[in-house]
Image (cartoon, rainbow, N blue to C red):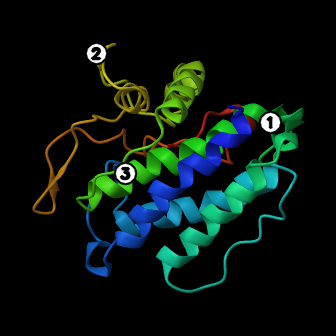
């Protein structure tokens, strides 16, 4: 399987989780510190167009106004179409800043945004979610390459220790500063959340001069 195949595998579980979010859950906390469910959806909507444009196969036009869940589903569809083209993963590109970054790195950011924040939304709303094992191994390896930089730039919280024998999803979550045991209990959570300010996220801060070098803002 080639890297351009992975985003189509990443999307369906996350879309299913988004569709199952109830309006009364919008205020629930998530594993991203400082973001409730609505805030996390808005975070994904904010960064999605830039990730789509970086593929050089999309104009990255934001989805029309409306229910944020439906808008996010359209945004994910846009990312899948943009990064499913083999050419999107070739050469150098950017998120809009002056610096160029290997397109493969930003493609992995797009896949990571869908998977990691899909997990965030599922955990925050009491859903079970899972992805293709090959996809998760790919993402773990990609996140591992940029985890130290991500922590330096506050995109990730401190690494959460996870046994090396744990599933790839758990090991990847630990690299992004998440505790795989995080779960919602009566509107509260019982495990550490991602570092304040970074949201354990994968998207770079556009105000940072190194934004085009940052790992995905998970």
Residue found at x 43% / y 46%: 199
Mark 1 and 2 residues: CB-CB less than 8 Å, in contact?
Answer: no
Q: CA distance from mark 3 to mark 1?
A: 25 Å
Residue projecting furthest to the left: 186
The image quadrant of residue 87 is top right
Q: Which mark is residue 120?
A: 3
The image shows residue 134 at horizontal and vertical percentages of 53, 30
Mark 3 and 1 residues: CB-CB less than 8 Å, in contact?
Answer: no
Neighbourhood count class around disc 2 (C-alpha, 10 Å): few under 14, some 14–19, many 20 upward: few
Q: Secondary structure beneath disc 2? A: loop
Judge whether 51 appears above or below 23 on screen. above
Q: Secondary structure beneath disc 3? A: helix
Q: Which mark is residue 163?
A: 2
Work out whether mark 2 precedes mark 3 in sequence or the reverse, and give the earlier one: 3
Q: Secondary structure beneath disc 1? A: helix
The image shows residue 14 at horizontal and vertical percentages of 46, 57
- Residue 154 in sight here: yes
Q: Which residue is mark 1?
A: 103
């Amino acid at each position: 399987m080639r890297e351009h195949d992975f985003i189509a595998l990443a999307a369906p579980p996350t879309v299913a989780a988004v569709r199952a979010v109830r309006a009364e859950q919008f205020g629930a906390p998530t594993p991203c510190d400082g973001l409730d469910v609505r805030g996390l959806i808005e975070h994904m909507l904010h960064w999605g167009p830039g990730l789509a444009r970086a593929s050089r196969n999309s104009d990255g036009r934001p989805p029309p106004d409306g229910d944020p869940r439906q808008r996010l589903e359209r945004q994910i569809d846009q990312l899948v179409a943009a990064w499913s083209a083999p050419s999107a993963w070739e050469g150098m590109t950017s998120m809009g800043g002056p610096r160029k970054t290997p397109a493969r790195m930003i493609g992995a950011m797009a896949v990571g945004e869908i998977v990691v924040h899909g997990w965030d939304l599922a955990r925050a709303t009491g859903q079970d979610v899972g992805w293709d094992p090959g996809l998760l191994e790919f993402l773990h390896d990609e996140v591992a390459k940029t985890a130290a930089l991500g922590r330096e730039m506050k995109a990730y919280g401190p690494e959460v220790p996870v046994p090396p024998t744990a599933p790839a999803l758990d090991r990847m979550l630990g690299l992004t500063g998440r505790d795989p045991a995080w779960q919602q209990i009566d509107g509260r959570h019982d495990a550490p959340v991602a570092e304040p300010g970074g949201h354990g996220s994968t998207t770079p801060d556009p105000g940072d001069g190194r934004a085009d070098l940052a790992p995905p803002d998970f």
